């Protein structure tokens, strides 16, 4: 009897990818819901059959994701469940050492493995295969990079696989991942490819545009005046080549000036440009909040600046134009004026729930304050709703992983219709399949866009709604993510072709 259960029938593309990934270190890029985990299981089985006394390691960023991997192994293999071990930081170090010794399949977070490698509780000599899930996390400082390096040093028969739905939209990002995980082969499948197409559930997209209110536009005008003044100064003094740098470019500039300022003897002439850049970043953030979130988010942010003891925050708050903007924000806030997207969202959700009282909807929002606001609005409308947020605790406002899992369980069982989630709901948690996903605001990140999209229509046709404020960052971010995703696919196919050519040439020589 083989290790794979007889009733498990892998799809052709899963078998083909697993076959290639069994030969060399491979990055697997596959849309969410198309069975990346089974590919990892298939290669694990192949390695354990080839090296019967060896072990395999699966590592994923969160405990819930690792629990899913354990469940998958138990469900599809004939392996002794006691040999499939989920290691967590809660287990005593001495007990972990025993579990590592006795296990065949080790599943753990990268932080746990890194710590145990450092303190000698685990040695990777006898591991014939390692899977890095959510491989786009393989950046310089992340534990994946350290583990991959140690694995290459220690293992007798090393083989690495990285799994991701989206490694990133730039060649630099993708090259970083392939370098850090010692990747020699790329296996990519998109929703359009012949061997995958039949398994992809259709996603119907809808774009709903709202106008940017005139009173919002006037507030933006005052903030932009102050911003332009700073940017023009930076341009005229040759700190930037653009009159319209974005937030990312300004953050890079801030880092660059900061490094020059701190290098050797402090260069105090750089203090003023540093302040100009910092002020510009804060003003861009304020405008972004106004455009994409609304009055209450901007009000809270500007109040924080007013109350702050930092010189830079006080300087922004005391500028006559900022004060005029704040006066108008306070006026709209006191009237309870909401962003038109919030009004439209309520209308959409009321209509959908009326049509189908058992409907499941997930709403993605970037900011915690917006998550709370949306949830309250839905509850006030008499619809059952709950939130899903990260573990970062500010004044006790975070959610533990156990609370997250419990919320998702209740959502899956139909206890409530609407789940309002921050970025935590995009990755690392087993979110039940939903009928509708609504982006309260588009995100510029292609990784986050792909992950959000992967939460819908896994079993049935899913529907995706983008709420977009016309002529604002909402539109810019939507098209930016689209462009980056297209670019990412091109880079990956190009990389695969180069790697294949290199291999063919090696065989020929």
Image (tube, helix red, strand yellow):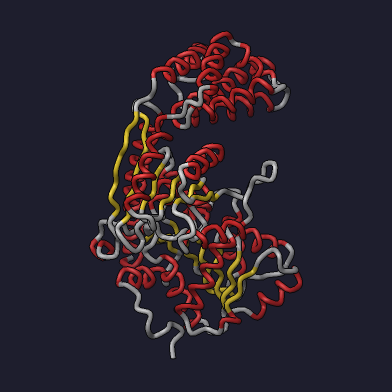
Residue for point 50% across, 42% down: 380
Q: Nearer the viewer, residue 252 or 217?
A: 217
Q: Quadrant of residue 70?
A: bottom right
User: How many numbered badges does the structure rendering display?
Assistant: 0
Residue for point 44% across, 31% down: 292
Q: Nearer the viewer, residue 52 or 82?
A: 82
Q: Is residue 218 above or below residue 76?
A: above
Q: Quadrant of residue 273?
A: top right
Q: Nearer the viewer, residue 446 or 211?
A: 211
Q: Is residue 269 above or below residue 130?
A: above
Residue for point 49% across, 47% down: 420
Q: Quadrant of residue 197?
A: bottom left
Residue for point 30% across, 39% down: 207
Does 69 sit left or right of 115 as displayed?
A: left
Q: Is residue 270 above or below residue 359?
A: above
Q: Furthest-left residue in view?
A: 194
Which of the image's four quarters has the C terminus? bottom left
Q: Furthest-bottom residue in view?
A: 1
Asked if one can make out residue 50 in the rendered structure from this viewpoint, the answer is yes
x%, y% of residue 434?
A: 39, 56
x%, y% of residue 343?
A: 41, 34
Which of the image's four quarters has the N terminus? bottom left
x%, y% of residue 481?
A: 38, 40
Q: Furthest-front residue in view?
A: 382
Does 104 sit left or right of 464 as displayed?
A: right
x%, y% of residue 468?
A: 36, 34
Q: Is residue 248 above or below residue 124?
A: above
Asked if one can make out residue 235 in the rendered structure from this viewpoint, the answer is no
Does 194 sit left or right of 494 as displayed?
A: left
């Amino acid at each position: 009897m083989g290790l794979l259960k007889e009733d498990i029938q892998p799809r052709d593309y899963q078998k083909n990818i697993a076959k290639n990934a069994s030969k060399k270190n491979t990055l697997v890029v596959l849309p969410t819901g198309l069975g990346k985990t089974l590919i990892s299981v298939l290669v694990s089985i192949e390695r354990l059959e080839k090296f019967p006394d060896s072990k395999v390691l699966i590592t994923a960023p969160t405990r819930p994701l690792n629990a899913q991997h354990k469940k998958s192994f138990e469900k599809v293999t004939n392996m002794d469940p006691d040999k499939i071990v989920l290691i967590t930081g809660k287990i005593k170090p001495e007990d972990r050492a025993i579990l590592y010794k006795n296990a065949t399949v080790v599943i753990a977070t990268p932080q746990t493995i890194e710590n145990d490698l450092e303190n000698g509780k685990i040695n990777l000599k006898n591991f014939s295969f390692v899977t890095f899930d959510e491989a786009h996390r393989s950046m310089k400082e992340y534990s994946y990079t350290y583990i991959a390096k140690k694995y290459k040093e220690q293992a007798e028969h090393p083989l690495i696989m990285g799994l991701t739905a989206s490694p990133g939209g730039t060649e630099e990002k993708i090259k970083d991942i392939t370098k850090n995980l010692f990747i020699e082969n790329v296996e990519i499948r998109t929703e359009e490819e012949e061997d995958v197409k039949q398994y992809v559930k259709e996603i119907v997209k809808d774009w709903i545009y709202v106008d940017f209110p005139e009173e919002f536009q006037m507030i933006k005008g005052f903030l932009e005046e102050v911003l332009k003044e700073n940017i023009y100064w930076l341009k005229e003094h040759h700190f930037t080549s653009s009159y319209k740098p974005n937030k990312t470019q300004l953050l890079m500039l801030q880092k660059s000036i900061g490094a020059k300022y701190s290098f050797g003897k402090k260069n105090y002439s750089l203090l003023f440009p540093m302040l100009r850049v910092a002020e510009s970043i804060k003003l861009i953030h304020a405008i972004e909040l106004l455009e994409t979130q609304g009055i209450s988010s901007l009000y809270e942010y500007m109040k924080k600046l007013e109350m702050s003891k930092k010189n830079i925050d006080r300087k922004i708050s005391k500028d006559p134009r900022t004060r005029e903007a704040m006066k108008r924000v306070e006026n709209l806030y006191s009237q309870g004026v909401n962003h038109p997207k919030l009004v439209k969202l309520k209308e959409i959700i009321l209509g959908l729930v009326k049509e189908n009282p058992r409907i499941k909807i997930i709403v993605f929002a970037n900011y915690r304050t917006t998550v709370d606001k949306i949830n309250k609005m839905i509850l006030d409308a008499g619809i059952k709703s709950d939130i899903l947020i990260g573990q970062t605790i500010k004044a006790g406002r975070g959610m533990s992983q156990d609370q997250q899992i419990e919320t998702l369980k209740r959502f899956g069982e139909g206890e409530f219709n609407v789940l309002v989630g921050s970025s935590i709901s995009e990755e690392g948690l087993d979110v039940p399949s939903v009928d509708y996903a609504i982006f309260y605001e588009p995100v510029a990140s292609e990784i986050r866009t792909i992950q959000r999209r992967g939460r819908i229509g896994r079993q049935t046709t899913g529907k995706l709604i983008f709420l977009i404020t016309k002529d604002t960052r909402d539109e810019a971010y939507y098209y930016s993510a689209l462009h980056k995703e297209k670019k990412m696919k091109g880079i990956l196919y190009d990389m695969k072709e180069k790697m294949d050519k290199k291999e063919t040439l090696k065989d020929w020589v």
